[in-house]
Amino acid sequence: MVEMAKEILIVIIASSLILNVALGLSLASVINSMGLMAKKIAEYEAKWAEEPWSPPEGLGYLPPGTVATRWSRDMVLVYIDARSYTDPNFMWNPERFKWLVAYIDSENRTVDFLFDGFLIIGYIWKEGRSLLPLKNKSPADKSDWEDFLNLQLEVGAKNLNEAIKEVSQELGAPNYMAKLVLTIPYPDKRQHDFGEVDGESLDLGKTEDRVKAVEWFVDEALSLWSQYYLNGSVNRLELIGFYWLHEQVEPGDADVIREVSSHVHEMGYLLFWIPWFRAPGVDNWREIGFDVVTMQPNYAFYDCGLDRFEKAAETCYRYGMGVEMELPLYKRNPRISDWKESFEAYMAAGVKYGFMNQAMLTYYYGNAFVTMATTSELREYYEKIYWFVKGTYPNAPP
């Protein structure tokens, strides 16, 4: 109701502004009216934040820090893909990872642990290819999958591991370990010449070959992981699962996911998924084979009002999902002025709908959070992320 009232108010005041201009009123009068509009909108947004919420019937949020999530609570997305070769925002070293492993204050002091989980993710690949089924991109093949896996481990896991070593020593917790999830490239049905697996050429237009390709990737990842672990390169990381990259369940995908899930479970790991708002597969994600799901509200990216958070919270609560915190340094929602407005809305929604402390959370995205932490005029947003992770927002931890 508050959101509807806000939209009606915007229409009324905007109409009044147009009338003022048409009547030839002074610029000062128009500016005063614009100030009134901003003030009234702020008042309605404050009422939205205070309006009580009654959760629907359902399973409740996917709880954080339990065996169901392998004890992870706050998992940050770290983007590593073809852009990591050319774009500094996608390049990683221990120093950059430290800002995510720990909360580092404005005096450059390591104060506290920050994110306890890390999802290495990417989808843009070289020479116009993609790890997702994008219409304007060609599908990746086996060699691309191998290169992406090596990138996840060499640029991602190894540098993250070094950051954890440094932070854990600085915080006096030498045995601290963080959780890690690796991304499985999407087995694109358009790829009819994937490459050979066990002497057999795979056509990903066939369900059985899609399953074989993904199972090969998981096995290859675990084999390499064992080697890295034995030589001490990832010994401060606990690999807890794999991420299904496509954000909706396409026709024909459910059978593949079930087989992949079974294989991942046999190896002792979980299957993670982050669908877009009410994407196909959300209402039966457990039956499909996913273990940990956090749904995107998509307020930052689509033409929607603040009521989107209530709808997202109700959906996550009803179907037992966690929530994705979408906090980029850009905005696409035409109803908001800038990314900062969207940022504050996500934070307020986490408090209002209880998912700040009651739900498993994933955070989009670590690349931007490092920029916030290392840019003085954006520093306050890094601080607020820390408060939110610690469950005390809008106040600083004691």
Image (cartoon, rainbow, N blue to C red):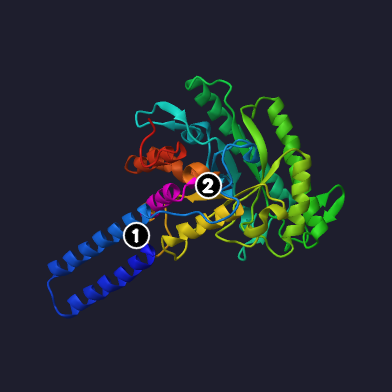
Q: Quadrant of the C terminus?
A: top left
Using the image, tell me which numbered label, if any, was put on residue 354: none
Work out which quarter of the rendered image holds the N terminus and state it. Answer: bottom left
State the image coordinates of residue 25 (x, y, percent, origin top left): 13, 75
Residue 228 position within the rendered picture, expressed as x and y whole percent measured from the top left:
69, 30
Is residue 381 found left or right of 152 in the rendered image?
left
Q: Please name the residue that numbered disc 2 is placed on.
A: 86
Crowding around mark 1 (Cα neighbors within 10 Å: few <14, some 14 to 19, many 20+) is few
Cβ atoms at labels 2 and 1 below 8 Å apart: no
Residue 58 drawn in magenta? no
Q: Which residue lies at the image location 46% right of the left edge and 34% below the top edge?
A: 99
Single out the mark in the foreground, 2 or 1: 1
The residue at the point 81 percent across, 56 percent down is 209
- Left or right, residue 398 beside residue 82: left
In 3D space, how far apart are the residues under numbered discs 2 and 1 (Cα atoms)? 30 Å
> Sequence-wise, which precedes: disc 2 or disc 1?
2
Magenta span main SS: helix
Tell me what residue is drawn at x 19 percent, y 80 percent. 22
Magenta span: 341-355
Residue 88 visible to an observer of this rendering:
no
In the displayed structure, does residue 87 sit left or right of residue 33? right
Per the image, label 2 sits on a secondary structure element best described as loop
Residue 389 image offset from top left, x and y in percent: 46, 39
Amino acid type assigned to the residue bearing label 2 in the image = Thr
Q: Is residue 199 in view?
A: yes
Q: Name the residue under label 1.
A: 337
Q: How crowded is mark 2: few (under 14 residues within 10 Å), some or many (20 or more)?
A: few
The amino acid type of the residue labelled 1 equals: Ser
